[in-house]
Amino acid sequence: MKLVRWYPLQDWVPPVDVFEQNDQLVIRAEVPGVQKADLDVRIANGVLTLHGERKRETDVTEDNAFRLERTYGPFTRNFSLPRTVDGASVTAAYTDGILEVRVPKAESAKPKKVEIQAA
């Protein structure tokens, strides 16, 4: 049987959800098949960068494959962060192929109740 390859038109870009939850931004990236050691999360100059690489299994070669459709290689995603976040308190977790990054809002950006003084 002849090997059929599928070549993507662009580099691999994992899908990402970005949303607000309580007092933080949450970024969830689908990166199945990527090892934790191959992931890198950085913040510099107000930009959050997710970088990683999905490596091809060594037991699959062109000699023993019938069809290759999965995309491999490095990826980079950049997200501009609002000035209202606390970049020093960012956390990241990786579970079941999902990389989740939590960026808390700065104290100055959180809503505050203003006490009304009696006149």
Image (tube, rainbow, N blue to C red):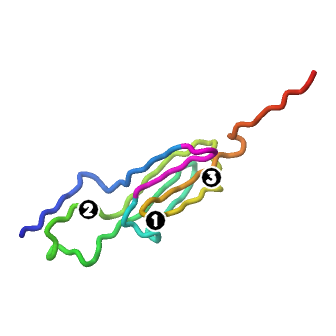
**Label 2 – label 3 distance at C-alpha:** 34 Å
59 versus 93 height, above or below: below
Residue tagged by mark 1?
39
Residue at 42 percent across and 70 percent down: it is: 35
Q: Secondary structure at mark 1?
A: strand
Amino acid under disc 2: Arg
How dense is the environment of label 3, judged by Cα within 10 Å: few (below 14), some, or many (20 and up)? many
| Separation of marks 3 and 1 at Cα, in angstroms | 19 Å
What's the magenta region? Answer: 20-30
Viewed as shown, does residue 58 lie left or right of 52?
left
Whether tag 2 and tag 1 are in contact, CB under 8 A, the answer is no
Residue located beneath label 3 in the image:
87
Residue 90 found in image quarter: bottom right
CA–CA distance in space, label 2 to label 1: 19 Å
Nearer the N terminus, badge 2 or badge 1? 1
Looking at the picture, how far across and down is residue 17, in whole percent? 45, 47
Looking at this view, name the residue that lies furthest to the top.
Answer: 119
For the residue pair 28 and 81, the one nearer the viewer reads as: 28
Please name the amino acid that badge 1 sits on: Leu
> Dividing the image into 4 quarters, which one contains the C terminus?
top right
Question: Circle 3 — which element?
Answer: helix
Prevalent SS, magenta region: strand
